[in-house]
Amino acid sequence: MGYVNGLKCRECGREYPVDPIYVCEFCFGPLEVVYDYKKIKKVLTRKSIKAREENLWRYKELLPIDGEPQVGLESGFTPLIKADNLARELGVKELYIKDDTVAHPTLSFKDRVVAVALTKAKEFGFDTVACASTGNLAHSVSAHGAKAGFKRFVFIPATLEASKIVASLVYEPNLVAVDGNYDEVNRLCSEIANKYKWAFVNINIRPFYAEGSKTQGFEIIEQLGWKAPDNVVVPCASGSLLTKVWKSFKEFKTIGIIKELNTKVFAAQATGCSPIAAAIKTGTDVIRPVKPNTVAKSLAIGNPADGFYAIQVVKETGGYAEDVSDEEIIEGIKMLARTEGIFAETAGGVTLACTKKLIESGKINNDETTVMCITGNGLKTQEALSGHTASPHFIKPNLASFEEVLKKIGGK
Ligand SMILES: *Cc1c(COP(=O)(O)O)cnc(C)c1O
Ligand SMILES: [Zn+2]
């Protein structure tokens, strides 16, 4: 009853059955899910989508499951916000925010990938799920996994923001804080995944997990009135989200939901961890791994698994990349809050600050429609702002004390 043909190597094209596997045995290329688009085209239309509930499963034929959705039944379908105040400040005509700061249940876009991964883990018959995380994935696997009744092993770099650690621990997973950076955590997890029969959402079931990111792209097109934007700016850690947003746009064209597709895809990174942006800016296909040093911990992957493919998408679509300093990231967070009333985490600051640079350099035309993917909530990374916001006005509990303050700020 599914719409999946199987898995296929992105490098040599060898085909594999639907199994919890992720690399080609012959060339070590990554495996990707392939679908029967002819069959999907018959059932998935603007009309059939519109008639469904407002969650990410409204596009289920384009997601790699065989049966019915089992996890994340309330996830996805976050707002697309027309950011007129911000557009005015940046001097562009039309700007939108895809607002995953309010994703259900854990306030980041990772709820999309985990909903799909854990549904697939159930179909495969796993009783334990696991992940290597830069923070948000830990949070989402802990939460979705609790609701779905999985045993959970969650691996993070020990230096993660305290608020993200608490946000995961509250769901009582087995949280393992590794003395090392994400790339070292990930390497360790690959070894563990070889030994234990667990569903590592971003390792052995990564081909299925990654497909969940497409729902952000499907929603952008639907919420723009069945139209692809001229530009989309996507923050990159492993580069997976960027490649999947583009895949989603192409799939909607393939099955006839949109007729035209001329979107330019832009990559956004923090300068302190910008292997993808650096390669694009210097015009090479070769990713040079880096040791991350940035306040944007959720994007701190120094050796990005999908970096090569992200570069190809940016090149193929005529986009570009930018990177921004920690100061610019914090200014970006504050600008988004000040203009649009949205509190994003550091990755959101990266996306906004990069978009601003791309507009200023003319890489993004100011008479076009641009969508920024704002992928996580600021309440999760509050420490990044400490010392960067104003202090409250401290007063005595009487009117005179208040009016003294009022006079000082010229409020009256
Ligand atoms: C994980 C993450 C991303 C990007 O992830 P990819 O690995 O590039 O798919 C972007 N924003 C936030 C907040 C994230 O947690
Ligand atoms: Zn291969």
Image: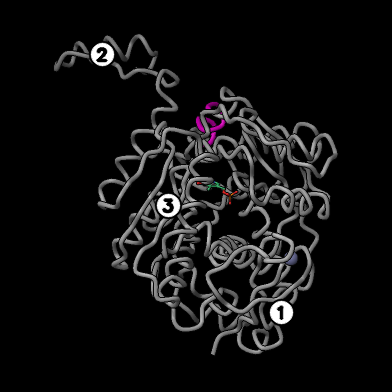
| Quadrant into which the C terminus falls | top left
> Is the residue 220 above or below the residue 70 in the image?
above
Would you name the residue on which mark 1 appears? 255
* Sequence-wise first label, 2 or 3: 3
For disc 1, the neighbor class at 10 Å (few under 14, some 14 to 19, many from 20) is some
Would you name the residue on which mark 3 appears? 102
Cα–Cα gap, marks 2 and 1: 64 Å
- Residue 151 is left or right of residue 228, and the answer is left
- Residue 192 is left or right of residue 143, and the answer is right
Would you name the residue on which mark 2 appears? 403
Residue 95 coordinates in the image, percent (x, y)? 65, 47
Q: How many marks?
A: 3
Cα–Cα gap, marks 2 and 3: 37 Å
Magenta-colored segment: predominant secondary structure: helix
> Is the residue 355 above or below the residue 383 in the image?
below
The disc labelled 3 sits on which kind of residue?
Val
| Span highlighted in magenta in the image | 330-336
Residue 116 coordinates in the image, percent (x, y)? 48, 68
Which residue lies at the image location 42% right of the left edge and 33% below the top edge?
179
The disc labelled 1 sits on which kind of residue?
Ile
Q: Quadrant of ligand 2?
A: bottom right
Front: mark 2 or 3: 3
Q: Nearer the viewer, residue 138 or 388?
A: 138
Cα–Cα gap, marks 3 and 1: 29 Å
For disc 2, the neighbor class at 10 Å (few under 14, some 14 to 19, many from 20) is some
View extreme (left): residue: 397
* Sequence-wise first label, 2 or 1: 1
